[in-house]
Image (cartoon, rainbow, N blue to C red):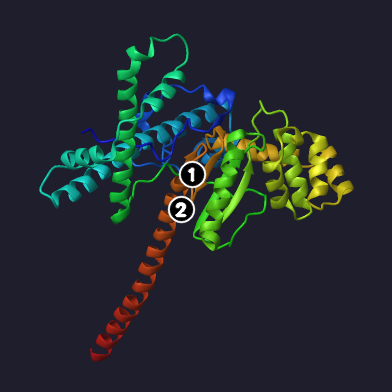
């Protein structure tokens, strides 16, 4: 029995609306040698933002000034490094999942003095039943295009259905084994330093987890992910601080103005209610007339909102977020950062939950270690003082 393959925790291409120009990346393999094995975005050097990278006639140019220039070449290069990092992480995570699956199966099989393959084969065979003739015929009818007669294809259809059921049964059983065991995963996605931006954040300022999402109000995958993010915030409540930043993709004609509109709502203290309204609105309601209607539906001062939106007062702020996103190497939406760890594309709730929980646990462990070190330090000082007194 072959161990079933598992999907990677973070899928780069799954549920991501891509930025056209920046999606044309060089092959990741050309960059792998520049990457750290366990995440973190690797740049050309380890210089800090205050380090001097050049001096001209006594004038010093720092790394920070270089980074702020954000030329197209630099942004493309960052994108290539970021995407290669994510690809490397996905490969590592996929390999790690297979290793964990094999280990939990081996541990369970050892109780019966058999191999993991033997155990899995036995479990799967007890779960699988041949489909009915009606099911086979329905499957046959669903096969598109020209095809052989049903009688000629029946064997292949039966084999295909059994293979699907075997994989599902194996996946379900291994998940049960994983759920029964204490599994601590230390492998993390690539990490970057990401600012909160100017829109108001939701959650306690001292929350152990900071979640920053770069998104586009017209992006279908962002709209899909919004339900997941609401569930995540509900699960972790005071443990997570959530910030939204704008990354309106050029191919979405309403996205930039919608981002401006949300910020205009923010000027009246209603950014999040309006944000939620836009993500639940029909796509045609993201045009200017719909944006103004939505403003009144959430109780905003209509005249004040209209003046803000029509004047383009928030356009520059939206552009700042977009340029910051490009500087981070973002190529599509949604792109999310959990304490700086990158998740690209519409991710499943379990994926986000596991990474947030990992960060919460890490924070609690650090607090426990810090609190334990203080009494030890006091005891050492007291001991030293006593020894000094004896001398």
User: For mark 1, what is the residue?
Assistant: 51
Q: Which residue appears at 62% of the width and 47% of the height?
A: 244
Quarter placement of the C terminus: bottom left
Q: Which residue appears at 29% of the width and 45% of the height?
A: 173
User: Residue 2 occupies which quadrant of the picture?
Assistant: top left
Query: Which of 234 and 208 lies nearest the eye of the viewer?
Result: 234
- The x, y position of residue 250, in whole percent, is 66, 27
- The x, y position of residue 323, in whole percent, is 62, 36
Residue at the right extreme of this rendering:
303
Mark 1 Cα-neighbour bin, 10 Å: few <14, some 14–19, many ≥20: few
Query: Between tags 2 and 1, which lies in front?
Result: 2
Query: What label sits on residue 183 in the rendered view?
Result: none
User: For mark 2, what is the residue?
Assistant: 356
- The x, y position of residue 192, in whole percent, is 48, 44
Q: Is residue 273 visible?
A: yes
Query: Which of 24 and 134 lies nearest the eye of the viewer?
Result: 134
154 lies left or right of 145: left
259 lies left or right of 376: right
Q: Which residue appears at 18% of the width and 38% of the height?
A: 117
Relative to 369, residue 92 above or below = above
Query: Which of 192 and 148 lies nearest the eye of the viewer?
Result: 148
Query: Which of 366 and 389 lies nearest the eye of the viewer?
Result: 366
Quarter placement of the N terminus: top left
Q: Which residue appears at 41% of the width and 31% of the height?
A: 84
- The x, y position of residue 371, in whole percent, is 38, 72
Residue at the left extreme of this rendering:
113
Mark 2 or mark 1: whose residue is earlier in sequence = 1
Relative to 209, residue 352 above or below = above
Secondary structure type for disc 2: helix
């Amino acid at each position: 029995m072959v161990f079933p393959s598992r999907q990677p925790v973070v899928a780069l291409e799954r549920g991501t609306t891509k930025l056209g120009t920046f999606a044309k990346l060089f092959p990741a393999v050309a960059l792998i040698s520049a990457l750290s094995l366990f995440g973190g975005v690797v740049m050309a050097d380890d210089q800090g933002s205050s380090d001097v990278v050049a001096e001209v006639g006594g004038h010093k140019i720092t790394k920070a000034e270089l980074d702020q220039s954000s030329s197209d070449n630099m942004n493309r290069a960052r994108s290539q490094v970021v995407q290669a990092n994510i690809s490397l992480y996905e490969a590592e995570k996929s390999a790690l999942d297979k290793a964990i699956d094999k280990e939990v199966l081996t541990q369970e099989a050892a109780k019966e003095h058999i191999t993991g393959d033997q155990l899995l084969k036995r479990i799967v065979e007890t779960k699988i039943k041949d489909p009915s003739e009606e099911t086979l015929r329905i499957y046959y009818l669903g096969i598109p295009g020209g095809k052989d007669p049903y009688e000629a294809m029946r064997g292949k259809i039966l084999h295909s259905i059994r293979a699907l059921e075997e994989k599902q049964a194996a996946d379900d059983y291994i998940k049960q084994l994983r759920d029964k065991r204490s599994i601590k995963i230390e492998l993390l996605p690539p990490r970057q330093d990401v600012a909160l931006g100017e829109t108001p954040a939701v959650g306690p300022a001292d929350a152990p987890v900071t979640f920053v999402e770069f998104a586009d109000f017209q992006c279908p995958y962002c709209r899909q992910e919004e339900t997941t993010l609401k569930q995540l915030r509900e699960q972790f409540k005071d443990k997570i601080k959530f910030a939204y930043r704008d990354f309106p993709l050029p191919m979405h004609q309403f996205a930039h103005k919608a981002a401006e509109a949300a910020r205009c709502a923010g000027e009246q203290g209603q950014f999040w209610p309006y944000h939620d309204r836009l993500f639940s609105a029909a796509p045609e309601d993201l045009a200017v007339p719909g944006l103004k209607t939505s403003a009144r539906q959430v109780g905003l001062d209509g005249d004040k909102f209209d003046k803000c939106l029509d004047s383009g007062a928030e356009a520059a702020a939206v552009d700042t977020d977009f340029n910051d996103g490009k500087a981070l190497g973002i190529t599509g939406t949604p792109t999310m950062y959990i304490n700086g760890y990158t998740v690209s594309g519409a991710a499943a709730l379990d994926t986000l939950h596991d990474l947030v929980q990992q960060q919460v646990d890490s924070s609690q462990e650090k607090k426990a270690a810090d609190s334990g070190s203080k009494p030890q330090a006091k005891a050492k000082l007291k001991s030293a003082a006593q020894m000094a007194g004896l001398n």
